[in-house]
Amino acid sequence: MSGVDESARQLSPVARLHIEKAVTGLVDEFGHHQSRETIERIMDDSLGQLVREGSQVEDFMPALAHRFTRERLKALARAHGPEHAEPDVLFIGLEDSGRGQMAAALVTLRSEGEVVAHSAGSRVGATVDPAVIEVMGELGVDLSEAYAKPLAPEVVGAADVVVTMGRSVGAVEIPSDTRHEDWRVGDPTGAPVDEVRRVRDDIDERVQALLAELRPEPAA
């Protein structure tokens, strides 16, 4: 791959081979929308961001870079797709280890997958908080394979609604024509399970109110 981020060059030859295979799969899936060069560029950038964060084990890096790149390519396809595409909501937390992960998962759960939801961090953390995984599991939501994601311009650009999860997120550049909300909710990262459960329920109420606006009931 050309133009590989310098930090990505530190990966082993085996990891690089897996990434090459991932690019080929993404070209097969998205090649009718994007050139191979564009897909390689986004993969390089995704990989570079994840490597620079230093938060992921190298053995998992190719899989995570593939997932992150695929999310970005799907966002590009939606941004240039039909106007009747399903609503798209992006939740931005500080480290993408708690609040945003819960909110995105709750949107998927409560909308039965009819609303696209993402989470990202303005400063990516290491892993999703174990208590967050536990309390979401109580609702039948499996976050065991969730991972912290950096902000990606394609995902921000495709979102119909961007929700920042409190002041700690800091300044985020959001397109002027995109709806923006700021939810002041507690930070579950590192908190006791009872507090994490309270934060989950608070977010759940807000998610259901948002979905009622995005998916109004048809007139009788």
Image (cartoon, rainbow, N blue to C red):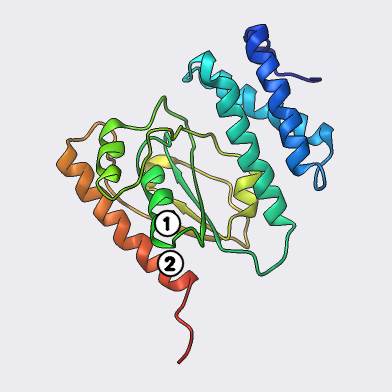
Q: Do the residues bearing badges 2 and 1 touch, measured as CB atoms within 8 Å?
A: yes
In this rendering, does residue 213 appear at all?
yes
Give the secondary structure at mark 1: helix
Residue 177 drawn at (x, y percent): 63, 63
Q: Residue at x 31, y 37 (%)?
A: 133
Residue at the (74%, 18%) spot, across then down: 4
Reply above or below: 86 against 133: below
* Among the two numbered marks 2 and 1 on one chain, the one whose residue lies closer to the N terminus: 1
How many numbered marks have been drawn onto this rendered protein structure?
A: 2
Question: Which residue position holds label 1?
Answer: 107
Residue 14, position as x, y percentages in the image: 65, 10
Residue at label 2?
Answer: 211
Residue 202, by quadrant, is bottom left
In the rendered structure, which amino acid carries the disc numbered 2? Leu
Q: In the image, is 121 to the left or to the right of 127?
A: right
Question: Please, is residue 16 above or below residue 188 in the view?
Answer: above
Q: Toward which corner of the image does residue 213 lie, by quadrant?
A: bottom left
Q: Residues within 10 Å of mark 2 (few under 14, many from 20)?
A: some
